Amino acid sequence: MTRSVSNSELADWRTCRLRWWLRNVRELGVPEPEESAAQTGTLVHKLIEAHLGHEDPMLVMQAKAQERGFLRTDQVVLDTFKAWQQEWERLYAGVTIHALEQTLTANVDKAVSISGVVDVIGQRDGMAMVIDHKTTGLPLSFWGHDNEMLVRHQLMLYDWLRSRLMAGAGSYAEPSIVAAHVISTTGQRVKVLEWIISPDARESFGANLIHQVGEVAQAAEIWASGNIDPTDELYRRLMNIGRHCGTCDYRPLCNSILTGQENTENVARMTLVEVPRLAYRAR
């Protein structure tokens, strides 16, 4: 049996251990309406993927509208996609696309693997390239240093997976390019973040990544064993709220748990829904 740790689970682990526990151990998720920012961004991604795959993006849009009716956010999706479309030739100048929406999985050891879904795998200037599309509901001027660091970590994880899977071809020892195209749904502009990853940087990142995955796997096994007591040090260490609290959907539940005002299960049933677990799935 192999447990797979996803990029999103690692992000939860680094950002807030309580959020990690609620989503990946307790398997609770926040209901997401069709008109949410996340759903809007997902649809923009699908249109971009269709365009890059030489398909008609409007057919994707029409199929979605027939499936659930027209939403007020559909115009935002179209405007955002058209803004990207006006710049796509500049964004992809010199890029040869090899794969779209590629799921990459690599074993860390016999019991744990790590996976991620890469928007674009390609090549430019003789180097392998990974590109990820990001959408934001804020003007790009609000896209700060913390956002860039999170994106860079995700891109390096994707590049590490790509290199690990192609190590037999010698790509693990070659420099590569990682890039994020950040698309604002309000400013209708695209910001490009791009880094060249050296073999040494990739190797160092990979070592830290394997260590983090091991931490996540060990913590999950401890929680699964049922031997955790709320007074234990491990519980307290995991129950540290992160810096993201102001924008986190779990915040009301977290505050109730940590102040002892409400039973975890009662609040969970009122404010959250059970969702299929994506990160720790035996296969």
Image (tube, rainbow, N blue to C red):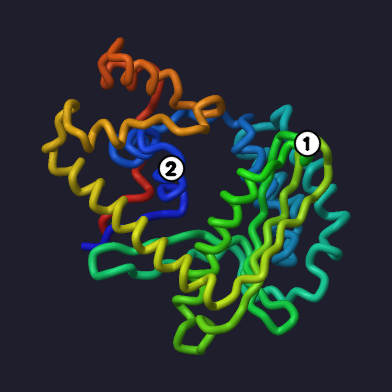
The numbered mark at residue 271 is none
> Do the residues bearing badges 2 and 1 touch, measured as CB atoms within 8 Å?
no
**Secondary element at image label 2:** helix
Image spot of residue 246 (x, y percent): 55, 25
Image spot of residue 35 (x, y percent): 63, 29
Comes first in the chain, label 2 or label 1: 2
Q: Which residue is mark 1?
A: 139
Residue drawn at the location 48% of the way across and 59% of the way down: 116
Q: Nearer the viewer, residue 209 or 191?
A: 209
Label 1 Cα crowd, 10 Å radius (few <14 / some 14-19 / many 20+): some
Q: Quadrant of the C terminus?
A: bottom left
* Left or right of residue 281: residue 129: right
Looking at the picture, does residue 101 appear above or below residue 121? above
Q: Which residue is mark 2?
A: 12
Q: Quadrant of the N terminus?
A: bottom left
* Left or right of residue 7: residue 134: right
Q: What amino acid is found at the position of numbered circle 2 in the picture? A: Asp
Image spot of residue 280 (x, y percent): 31, 50
Quarter of the image for residue 107 reads: bottom left
**Secondary element at image label 1:** loop
